Structure formats: C-alpha cells, structure tokens
Image: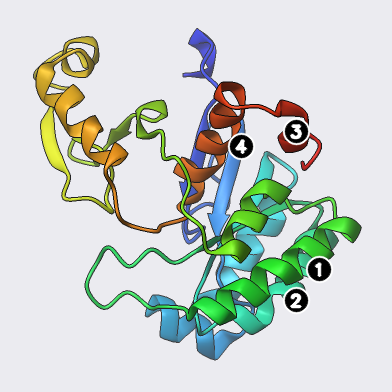
Amino acid sequence: MRTIGFYTLLITNGLKLKGKNLNADVVTISLDTLRRDRFYRITGVDALDKVIASIKWATNVYDVCINVVLHEDNADEVEELVRFADECGVYITFEPVSAYFQSCPDIRDEKLKSVALKLLELKKEYKCILNSKGYLKLIASGDKFNCLSNLLIRINPDCELIAPCYDVNFVRVGNVRMKSLKNLLSSNKYKKELELAKKCEHRCYLLCYAEPSLVFSSFLCTPLFDYFISF
C-alpha cells in the first residue's frame, strides 16, 4: 500500500509481531496493563513479556504507538503506562472502553473523568501522549460530540463495509470483493445508514471517530484556534 501512496497503520496485539516485515508506516500495539496477572485476566493469555518484547523490538523498525483501552481494571495504571511508553521512546493513546460486545468491561463515569483529568496533567510533561487536549477534555466533561462517522470507512475482516459504526445497530452494506468500494460508498443504503449517526444517542468516545470529528467540527464551527492550540 505504501508503494501507491497510502499511509499505512497496523493495529495489533503484538503477539506475533516480533521479526515481521510489515511494510507499515506506524504500528499500534494494544497494551492495557503492565501487570502480568491483569494481562492474563484481560486477554486470556499469559503473554505480557512477549508483547513488551515486541514493542521494544518494533521501536527499531517502525514508528510505534501503544493504545490503551481504559476500564475499571486498569484505570489506576495510567501514569505507569505513560512512563513506560516514554522510556521505550514510543507514543501512547488512551480511549475508554466501548461496551458494544457482550461481557465487555466497563468504567464508572467518575473514574473516567478522574483519569481524563490525570492525562491532561501528564500531557504537560510527557510528549508521548498523542491524545489531543480537546479529546481528553471531552471525556472529562462527559458530553457528547458531533460524530462525523462519514469521515471513516470501516470494513470488517470478512471484507464487508459497515455503517455507521459498531455502537449503533450497523448494517453490512456490501462486500468489497463483490462490488467496488466506490459503488458501495455512493449507494443509497450506505448514505441512509450514515444518517443514523446524526441521531445517535450513544455517548461513546471511540478514538478513531472522536478525534477526527473534533478536528473537522472545528472547521465547521469556529473558533479553530481554540482547538488546534490544544494539541
């Protein structure tokens, strides 16, 4: 993909990353805890050392970002995880858990607010935190945001284009192996499903939707300056 001008980002759990030539610009590695017992409880595998080894190996090959999904089991590890990323020379992002699957963990509103405020303080010292101040302030406030789901194209592992997102009762618009992506994106079915996001009552803070939506919303409703100085 890089050879045709795409900026490629791979998201992985890191278990089989070490030694791989992925031809990616950025590798994002999921890591929700630095404690072995918690890692096993969260993931179901005893592989914390293996993931950490993959992170340290990858820093010599790729631009690396650690992504942390925040929930009750790891909210007390935020500063520890930031320091780990800083010591490894990699970036780090945080996002609240979004319980769109059964048995997903959860996090209380007051706990989430305190974590977001903690990250805002840590961001003053640690440049490795990639979350914007605008995003962290949004989480701390508990407010909704104008979700521009049309900014992202989401395709499942089975090559099905979905809309609008996982937090809403999404539909499978079509398979990109059967129809061109251009035709699927211009279809009435896809456009109709995107309209659901405008009426969404969910209060999710999925990083991939929230950060782009905040940026583009700033273009549409000023002041731009207030948002961009928050990075």
Counting residues from the N terminus, which is met first, the one under dot 1 or under dot 4? 4
Q: Label 2, on which residue?
A: 80
Residue 161 seen in the figure: no
Element type where label 2 sits in the image: helix
Counting residues from the N terminus, which is met first, the one under dot 1 or under dot 3? 1
What residue is at 12 percent from the left and 30 percent from the top?
173
Side of 226 where 168 appears, left or right? left
- Would you say the residues marked 3 and 2 are in contact, meaning their CB atoms lie under 8 Å apart? no
Residue 168: x, y in percent? Answer: 23, 50
Q: CA distance from mark 3 to mark 4?
A: 23 Å
Residue neighbourhood size for the residue with mark 1, other residues' Cα within 10 Å, grouped as few (<14), some (14–19), many (≥20): some
- Would you say the residues marked 2 and 1 are in contact, meaning their CB atoms lie under 8 Å apart? yes
Q: CA distance from mark 1 to mark 4?
A: 20 Å
Q: Nearer the viewer, mark 4 or mark 2?
A: 2
Counting residues from the N terminus, which is met first, the one under dot 3 or under dot 4? 4
Side of 35 where 152 appears, left or right? left
Residue 189: x, y in percent? Answer: 10, 24
**Front-most of residues 197 and 121:** 197
Residue 7 seen in the figure: yes
Q: Amino acid at mark 1?
A: Arg
Q: Label 1, on which residue?
A: 83
Q: CA distance from mark 2 to mark 1?
A: 5 Å
Element type where label 4 sits in the image: strand
- Whether 75 is drawn above or below 227: the answer is below
